[in-house]
Image (spheres, helix red, strand yellow):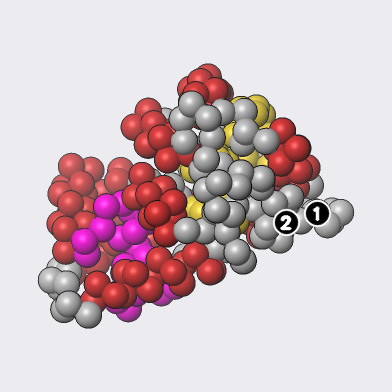
Amino acid sequence: MKAHRAGHKTAKTPKKAKAAKETPRGPLIRVVLADDHAVVRAGIRKILETATDIRVIAEAGDGAQAIETIAAASPDVAVLDVRMPKASGIDVTRWVRENSPSTAVLILSAYDEDPYVLAVLQAGANGYVLKNADAEDIVQAVRSVHAGKSAVDPEIARKVLGRVSGADAAGQPEELTDREQEVLALVAKGHTNKAIGSALQISPRTVQGHLAKIFDKLQAESRTEAVMRGVSLGLLPDTLRGA
C-alpha cells in the first residue's frame, strides 16, 4: 500500500464492513474516535459499530478535542489518526499514557512511513493499523488492544521488525535474565505492572526496575517496541497480531 505523502492530506475511505451478525466477545468496549475528516470518522464508526461488543461513545475532530474527550469519557480504547490539527496522534498518545493509562491507544492512519510508525509506538501506542485494512481487521484490532495485546498491520510490523533486526547486525544485545524474560513474556500478554508483580510475587516497583533493564538491553523505548524486539530476537512467539 502506497502511503499518502505529507502534502496530500486526503485519506482513503475504509473498506465497507460486512453485515455480519456477531455475538459479543466480552464486556462492551467503549471507544473514542478522533480524526479530522468527518466522512472518514463516519466510515470508521460504521465499521466499529457492526460489532455488537463495541460502541463509539464520542468523537473528536482534532487532537486537542481528543484529549478533552478522553479526559471526560475515560474510554477503554482511543482510536486516533496520526495527523490532526492542534495536537497530533503522537501528542495525544503521550497524553493518554501519562494521564489515562487504562485507555488503550489504536492508531488508525493512512500513513505507513517509518517516522510516523516509530514515533507513535515509542509514544506508547498499543497498535497501528492502516485505514484501508479490511473492516474485520479494524474491529479485531480494537478488541486486541482492549485485551492488552499489540495490533500492528503486517506490512508495518515487517518494516519495524526489519529496522529492529538491522540493529542486530552490530551485535546481539546483552542477554536477558530469566526474571527479565518472565517479565517480558507477561508484557507481551498485555499485563500491567501490578498484574505482573502479582503473578511473579514481586512489587510493581521491582517490575518497573526489570522493565528499565529490559528496555536498556533491547534498545527499546516502549513496551510495544520491547515486545517487537523480543519477537525479532526469538525471545517470544509472534504476538504482534494476537487474536
Res 49 → quadrant: top right
Q: Position of residue 187 (x, y in %)?
A: 34, 56
Residue 232 vs 38, above or below: the answer is: below
| Disc 1 residue type (three-letter) | Lys
Neighbourhood count class around disc 2 (C-alpha, 10 Å): few under 14, some 14–19, many 20 upward: many
Q: Give the residues in magenta.
A: 218-238
Depth order, front residue of 8/128:
8
* Residue 186 on image: x %, y %: 34, 59
Q: Say which element carries label 2.
A: helix
Residue under numbered circle 1: 16
The C terminus: image quadrant: bottom right
How far, Cα to Cα, is label 1 from label 2?
A: 6 Å
- Kindly check if marks 1 and 2 are in contact, taking CB atoms under 8 A apart as contact: yes
How busy is the neighbourhood of tag 1: few (under 14 within 10 Å), some, or many (20 plus)? some
Query: Which quadrant of the figure contains the N terminus?
Result: bottom right
Side of 17 where 194 appears, left or right: left
Left or right, 80 with respect to 214, comes to right
Q: Which residue is mark 2?
A: 135
